[in-house]
Image (cartoon, rainbow, N blue to C red):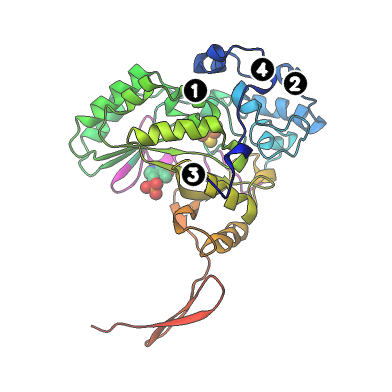
Amino acid sequence: MYPIDSLTNWASGKGVWSDIPDSEWKDWRWQMRNRLQKKSDFEKFITLTDDEILGFTAAEDKLSVAVTPYFFNLLDHNNPNCPLRKQIIPSGKESLESPEEMLDPVGEESSMVAPGVVHRYPDRVLFLVTDRCAAYCRYCTRSRLVSNAQGYGFHPQIDQSIDYIASNETIRDVLISGGDPLMLSDEKLFSILSRLSEIPHVEFVRFGSRIPVFLPQRITNSLIKALKSHSNVWISIHVNHPNECTTELREACHKLASSGIPLGNQSVLLRGINDSVSTMKQLIHRLLIMKVKPYYLYQCDLVKGSSHLRVDPSVGIDIIKGLRGHTTGYAIPQFVIDAPNGGGKIPINPDYLSDVNNEFFTLKNFEGKKFQYPRVSN
Ligand SMILES: *Cc1c(COP(=O)(O)O)cnc(C)c1O
Ligand code: SF4
């Protein structure tokens, strides 16, 4: 059925928790109750490196450490360079801060119009509903508030935020994020979506969530029912590496897709994790198999203590160059830099336009060959 990337290569199962009954393993509450958070939780299963041990101290006042048993199983327990391990186990390098780094790297605070509502673009808002996640990504853009390790004290004001959206008729698109919005109970999600569906100008609602990746067990029938309380909900998931694509994630995505929820993916370009054409190609092919459209590839934001995970933007451009034309157009994400200080997302592309004069657009194709398209005069 899937000739290119045989499904037998996809990870699955209970790993080091093989003695736990399926009924518990598949219960997202069990996964949440049994998250690994303390250094000693991890040391039961793996030998932490000196750098990782320092990382646990650095993390205390930066961003909490947590991971579900499900996702922990996907880490290479014997290899500190594992691309998944580096996303969730802290490094001592998180305590290094370079001068260009910021607490609020994309300038959200200055566009906050109500507690948790960032209104930067003309027709859409970012609506933050929680500061909690199922697991914490070490490079998180919003680590100033996420997990509250820095004492931000985020208290979403849902009523006030929805009032703001209701009273601004230009807002047709609401992006619900956090933290991870799917951490909220089904009841709470139902209530938020029902209220949004009463606002006639809100025609498009999407969630930004990494829950399907960290906790696919959370994608229950009752969650889907709650999500359907608005007639046009989309979800952007967040997968960075092909090893995060498991049988469980695929089933969760298929379940969402077949209930009528379109899916996109946002990846963050990360050093030693997904900074090569071959890794990205495998990732985006797996995303298509999961019925997920690769949406954005983000240059890693200048968040404090993230320099060890960032690469130069030219790496991202080269990756797109290595994909465009070489594989399915649907599979190619847009590479963007969310500009420091509130500039918003700016697309950057390989140079396919080699020259423009009064007569021709001179174009370069994926093989570097040049072609001319004549100007059209009116
Ligand atoms: C990313 C973002 C959006 C959504 O942008 P799209 O390009 O439509 O995905 C909206 N508001 C803010 C503040 C954002 O950061
Ligand atoms: S899931 Fe999203 S909000 Fe939560 S830590 Fe990861 S990047 Fe940040």
Mark 3 or 2 closer to N-term? Answer: 2
User: Which quadrant does the C terminus fall into?
Assistant: bottom left
Disc 1 marks a residue whose amino acid type is: Gln
Q: Is residue 338 left or right of residue 201?
A: right
User: Where on the picture, by quarter, is residue 201?
Assistant: top left
Q: CA distance from mark 4 to mark 1?
A: 15 Å
Q: Position of residue 245 (x, y in %)?
A: 56, 37
Q: Which residue is mark 3?
A: 289
Secondary structure of residue under mark 2: loop
Q: Which residue lies at the image location 59% right of the left edge and 33% below the top edge? A: 137
Give the Cα separation between the discs numbered 1 and 3: 19 Å
Query: Three-letter amino acid code at disc 3?
Result: Ile
Mark 1 falls on what kind of element?
Answer: helix
User: Could you tell which of marks 1 and 2 lies nearer the N-terminus?
Assistant: 2
Q: CA distance from mark 3 to mark 2?
A: 32 Å
Tag in front: 2 or 4: 4
Of circles 1 and 2, the one toward us is 1
Tell me the kind of residue under disc 2.
Answer: Phe
Q: Which residues are magenta?
A: 98-124
Is any atom of residue 76 visible in this view? Answer: yes
In terms of sequence position, does the residue under pointer 3 or pointer 4 come before the other?
4
Residue 366 lies, with reference to residue 166, above or below; the image says: below
Residue labelled with disc 1: 217
Q: What residue is pinned by disc 4?
A: 17
Read off the residue under disc 2: 45
Q: Could you tell me if the residues under marks 4 and 1 are in contact, i.e. CB atoms within 8 Å?
A: no
Mark 2 and mark 4: span between their CA atoms?
11 Å
N-term mark: 1 or 3: 1
